[in-house]
């Protein structure tokens, strides 16, 4: 039986050689002083980066600069990504009755109150002569249409793609490939 093994050669290490597991990754990001993400988000981010860039060679010759570049991207764009994921989770968790509930408007009128009216603040008058309310209710179609408009199918792709500049983008190895052949009986 003949076995051929292809070993790609790059001038730099691949992602998994820098961070073999998420513990190392999280420790390095926290030690960078640039982390603003929760531990849960860091675990998810490692898995996403591993899935996308696990076997990709880094673009920097200096591993410390690579780590700093990754930490800087996390600092710049991570908090927004984390919040967008949180909001998407809340939007996806809305119940039908919440989708059908519209806005509520309250109109108060105060005839001859004992306080001077002001347009400089938003404080409400303590005395009210008349109050009118408007409660809006959406149809199912309108509620689900609004939900569909709010749902983004992917809030993560844009964030993960920002790390592309940290990796070599050409798919070809930088050194020749060596093939090893093992023949039976040797």
Image: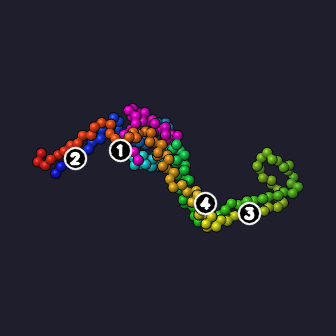
Quarter the C terminus occupies = top left
The residue pinned by badge 4 equals 146
Q: Whole-Å distance between the Cαs marked 1 and 3? A: 58 Å
Residue at the outermost bottom position: 140
Instruction: Tell me: 82 left or right of 52.
Output: right
Give residue 128's quadrant in the image. Answer: bottom right
Badge 3 vs badge 4, beta-carbon distance below 8 Å: no
The residue pinned by badge 2 equals 4
Residue 55 is marked as 1
The residue pinned by badge 3 equals 134
Looking at the image, is mark 2 or mark 4 earlier in the sequence?
Answer: 2
Q: Whole-Å distance between the Cαs marked 1 and 4? A: 40 Å
Residue 105 is situated, as x and y percent measured from the top left of the image, at 73, 59
Bounds of the magenta span?
52-76
Q: Is 40 placed above or below 99 here?
A: above
Q: Please state which of residues 127 and 47 is positioned toward the viewer in this rendering.
A: 47
Q: Whole-Å distance between the Cαs marked 3 and 4? A: 20 Å
Q: Nearer the viewer, mark 3 or mark 2?
A: 2
Mark 3 lies on a secondary structure that is strand
Mark 1 lies on a secondary structure that is loop
């Amino acid at each position: 039986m003949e076995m051929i093994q292809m070993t790609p050669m790059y001038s730099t290490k691949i992602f998994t050689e820098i961070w073999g597991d998420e513990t190392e990754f999280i420790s390095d990001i926290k030690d960078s002083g640039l982390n603003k993400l929760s531990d849960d988000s860091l675990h998810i981010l490692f898995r996403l980066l591993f899935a996308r860039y696990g076997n990709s060679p880094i673009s920097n010759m200096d591993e410390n600069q690579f780590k700093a570049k990754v930490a800087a991207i996390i600092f710049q764009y991570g908090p927004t990504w984390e919040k967008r994921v949180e909001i998407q989770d809340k939007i996806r968790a809305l119940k039908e009755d919440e989708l059908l509930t519209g806005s509520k408007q309250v109109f108060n009128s105060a005839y001859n109150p004992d306080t001077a009216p002001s347009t400089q603040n938003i404080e409400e008058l303590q005395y009210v002569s008349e109050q009118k309310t408007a409660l809006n209710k959406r149809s199912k179609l309108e509620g689900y249409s609004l939900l569909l408009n709010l749902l983004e199918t992917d809030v993560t792709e844009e964030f993960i793609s920002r790390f592309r500049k940290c990796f070599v983008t050409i798919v070809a190895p930088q050194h020749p490939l060596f093939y090893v052949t093992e023949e039976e009986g040797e």
